[in-house]
Amino acid sequence: MRRALATLVMAAAVAAYVMAEPAQALSCGDVSSNLAQCVKYLTGQQARPTGPCCGGVRRLKAMAATTADRRLACNCMRSAASRMKSLRYDLVNALPRQCAVPLNFFIDLNKCNQ
């Protein structure tokens, strides 16, 4: 009886694993590639973000579905921002609005608590 129950539990676990969609982990490479087209806007060299920039913002929002993903994305942006001398933080916060991609949090590259 125990053996049959253990086999049933194992079969259910395997079935659940096989049927589950594989998780897609967000990486700093994802963040960089999705925001690369935004650099000219974020440094004040362009008045408005381009279509490809806004497309990257939309993709990144969709990819960062969990709190952990958003923290990772924030830390990746924070690391990249530390290497960009001409980054304008006012434009960083304006980017989602300019691209019509609403966020329910404020972007603060000094701390990542999303």
Image (cartoon, helix red, strand yellow):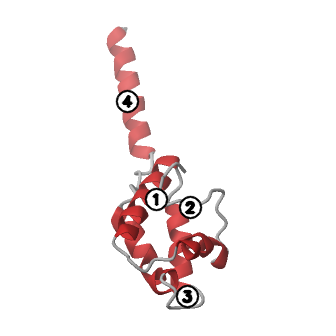
Q: Secondary structure at mark 2?
A: loop
Q: Secondary structure at mark 3?
A: loop
Judge depth for marks 4 and 2 and give the one in front.
Answer: 2
Q: CA distance from mark 2 to mark 1?
A: 8 Å
Which residue type does callout 1 highlight?
A: Cys
Which residue type does callout 3 highlight?
A: Thr
Instruction: Assess disc 2: are there few (<14), some (14-19) or many (≥20) residues with their C-alpha within 10 Å of its C-alpha.
Output: some
Q: Where does the image place residue 75, in percent across and percent down from the top left? A: 41, 57
Judge depth for marks 2 and 3 and give the one in front.
Answer: 2
Q: Mark 4 — residue?
A: 11
Instruction: Assess disc 3: are there few (<14), some (14-19) or many (≥20) residues with their C-alpha within 10 Å of its C-alpha.
Output: some
Q: Secondary structure at mark 1?
A: helix
Mark drawn on residue 65: none
Q: Mark 1 — residue?
A: 74
Q: Are marks 2 and 1 in contact (CB under 8 Å)?
A: yes
User: Which residue shows up at 52% across the image and 86% down it?
Assistant: 44
- Image quarter of residue 8: top left
Q: Mark 2 — residue?
A: 107
Judge depth for marks 1 and 3 and give the one in front.
Answer: 1
Mark drawn on residue 50: 3
